Image: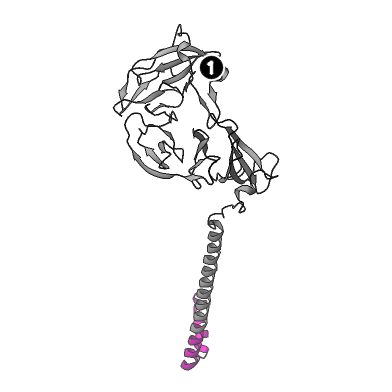
Amino acid sequence: MSDLIDFVCETERSVDQPPFAAMIVTQRQARRRRSAVTVTAALGAVLALVLAVAGLGQLGHRQLPSGPAPQLLVPDWTADQIVEHPDAFVVAQVESRSQPNTTLTVWKRCTQPRADHDCFGREAIAVVDGSDARLVTLGAVTGSSQQPSLGDEGLLREVDDGLWYWAHQNPGPYLLSATMSQPAHLTVMDRAVAHSFGVPSIECADRVGLCTLDQNARTLERLAIPQVPHTRWATPTATGCGLWGLAGVGGNLRLIIQQHDGSFASADIPDDSAAAAMAEGGPGCEIAYYQSIGENRDQLVVSLDQGKTWQIRQTPMPQVAGYAEEQPRFRTLIPPRWTSLPPMPHPLPPPRGLQPL
């Protein structure tokens, strides 16, 4: 090993060293090559970063929604272009309770007609009477089961002889009759107002809560009622009657009842595992409900003093006995001569005492 080291040293001494200037030039060339490599690498990294950011931006652009889908628009049909058109069909038809030959018909025409009528389109309402008087007006834009909800068709209720109230917004709400040249728009007063006992009530235009309808002033005013979850209010309530409703889903049912001083109280319904349904439309301001006892047999529980005392009668199921109304919404009605029904021999207990809300 020592001989090899001596040989290397002697060899280095025997080789002539390059001049100093040549060494400086060589070192500068090496630095330039290193600098060029460094700059090239840096430019490559920057270019890669730019391309990566651009790619992410495009990816993000593809993932982000491009904005709300354009709302579907029906053709600019008039009401006359919908009613009785060959492509239109009847959605609902309601006869006046008091005026013979007076009928309200709801028609619908679709942008692309389908045999099952499950299609996107627009409705129109026609009211006619026996003297050939006729009112035709546009109704709601309605969708199909394959599309998101575009709203609803509203609710029609006869509020006077041959006069209907259409609970709907945009368009509406309206009053409609065959003798009108155009529907009467109602002014909506949406601030809830407390009224004393006995105010008439009807469904609000948005079908949330109760309103009172002034036909002469053509106004619809929201009523202040207790905000109890899952309460369906008895409507319409005749003048002189208080407001009441059935609250709860499944078990834990209770009645919400307005008292003569305008306040509200609740009464729990015992044995609420048995099916219960409101019994509406009583001419004497009855607060009533049906409760299932057995097969095709119900008990009818009625109060004439705002829930202080109760009477229990036996009755067949309201659907079997014909005490059910399909339009304008399904509801069960109290029998007109309920006082002649026999007492229930072994009744379920009546509601418990009233509790202030």
Question: Which residue is at a point 45% across and 27% down the rendered structure image?
Answer: 249
Question: Which residue is at a point 60% across and 54% down the rendered structure image?
Answer: 76
Residue 145, percent across and down? 61, 41
Q: Is residue 296 above or below residue 178?
A: above
Instruction: Kindly tell me whether residue 307 is visible in this rendering.
Output: yes
- Badge 1 marks a residue whose secondary structure is loop
Q: How many marks?
A: 1
Question: Which residue is at a point 45% across and 7% down the rendered structure image?
Answer: 346
Is 222 placed left or right of 341 in the picture? left
Residue closer to the observer: 24 or 90: 90
The outermost residue toward the front is 131
Residue closer to the observer: 72 or 14: 72
Is 116 placed left or right of 184 in the picture? right
Chief SS of the magenta region:
helix
Judging by the rendered image, the residue that carries numbered circle 1 is 317
Residue closer to the observer: 329 or 201: 201
In which quadrant of the rendered view does residue 191 lie? top left
Residue 206, percent across and down? 46, 41
Q: Is 139 in the magenta? A: no
Q: Which residue type carries mark 1?
A: Met
Give the crowd class for mark 1: few <14, some 14-19, many >=20 residues within 10 Å: many
- Magenta range is 1-30
Quadrant of the image for the C terminus? top left
Residue 34, percent across and down? 50, 80
